[in-house]
Amino acid sequence: MIERYTLPEMGNLWNENYKLQTWLQVEIAVCEAQAELGYIPSEAVAEIKSKANFDPQRVLEIEAEVRHDMIAFLTNVNEYVGDAGRYIHLGLTSSDVLDTALALQLVASLDVLLLRLQDLIQAIRHKAREHRYTVMIGRSHGIHAEPMTFGFKLAGWLAEVLRHQERLQILRKTIAVGKISGAVGTYANIEPRVEAIACQKLGLKPDTASTQVISRDIHADYVQQLALVAASIERFAVEIRNLQKTDVLEVEEFFAKGQKGSSAMPHKRNPIRSERLTGMARLVRSHAGAVLENVALWHERDISHSSVERVVLPDACILTHFMLHEITDLVTNLLVYPQNMERNLNCYGGVVFSQRVLLTLIDKGLNREEAYAIVQQNAHTAWNQPEGNFRDLISKDPRVTQNLSSAEIETCFDPQQHLKHLDQVYQRLGI
């Protein structure tokens, strides 16, 4: 079970100090494995564990000279450890440490993201429950379609986020892979048993068949999953933006006391957070393309992926984390206006109830083409007039009234007819 308050913030998982700490963690785990198998003295491992340390600034100083980050790190660690340091990194290649440590960073990042995702799940669930019966118009192609509820719209969001939760839980297992297999991955200078023991100590599993690096399809999968989360957040944000339009105004981002929307127009209350989320989603999606390019490395290994990952992996994790925080707060404090939803629903005299009228006429014996023509003619007449009233037109059309009573017409315009099965969706989601 992940403890919420013991996890570091996302940014701290990607700073230089944390990265070097994971490198040291991997080196020590390998030394412990080597000692358990009798390859190095246990006393040396105890000395390494008690003395091993690093100074990020010193590592950078050494790297400026040697032009190799891992050698710089090992040189600095040995400055602290002394003679026992000769047992550190035995039989390893740099990527053994880099890729295994990167897995630790990615797993830790997913733990934080899963907690944030759970917060979003709870926020949407609460809002969906609150507006279970808040009737509004559903739209297709941006055009009024048929009645639904705002809670039902949110239920769709919840189902989507729950799928992301399941995907990220699977991804946590997929990414938790290490490799301690040496140059080109053949275990020429280190035994697979060392890898197995070290990975177990780190909470990882050995890669099935690594080259000199862990194949980058795993990392591409990671970022693509984050891009999917970002895409869903963008979908929610775009929906809020559309529903906040002045001529719609069914929901609105919370507008804090003292907040200002425009330097020129004092009346403005803009959906700035939703727009920000839309922009950030574009960034995360762009990273998904970059990691796909990383999959095709030369032979058993090159480092063309390294420069990309130094930017893309922390950026994707930090952006997704921030987006989850923002959308959760946005949903929690979202202003909902049921009166405006009702107003929009009854636009043009309830023209959105046209299908109920159509089906009722068919049920009374009219053929579909005849019934459709009657309903469409009245609907379009109402639609094209400033004060058009579909319900009034239907109630006065003799082709309708000779088939439907006033009570039957009244039933056609009852939005509850459209909500009678929504409880099944709520039951599926446990709302």
Image (cartoon, rainbow, N blue to C red):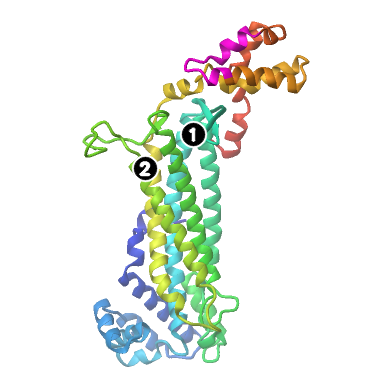
Residue located at (37% from left, 92% from top): 86
Instruction: Please tell me how crowded label 2 is: few (under 14), some (14-19), or many (20+) other residues with Cα within 10 Å.
Output: some
**Residue type marked 1:** Ala
Q: Is residue 67 magenta?
A: no
The residue carrying mark 1 is: 128
The residue carrying mark 2 is: 329
CB contact under 8 Å: marks 2 and 1: no
Side of 414 relative to 289 (left or right)? right
Secondary element under disc 1, as helix, strand or loop, is helix
Report if residue 386 is visible in the image.
yes
Report if residue 416 is visible in the image.
no
In three-dimensional space, the C-alpha distance between marks 2 and 1, rounded to whole angstroms, equals 15 Å
x then y, percent, for residue 126 = 45, 35
Residue located at (25% from left, 81% from top): 58
Residue located at (65% from left, 19% from top): 375
**Residue type marked 2:** Asp
Side of 21 relative to 403 (left or right)? left
Q: Is residue 343 above or below residue 10?
A: above
Side of 10 relative to 182 (left or right)? left
Look at the image and give the residue range highlighted in magenta: 381-397
Residue located at (23% from left, 33% from top): 266
Side of 6 relative to 368 (left or right)? left
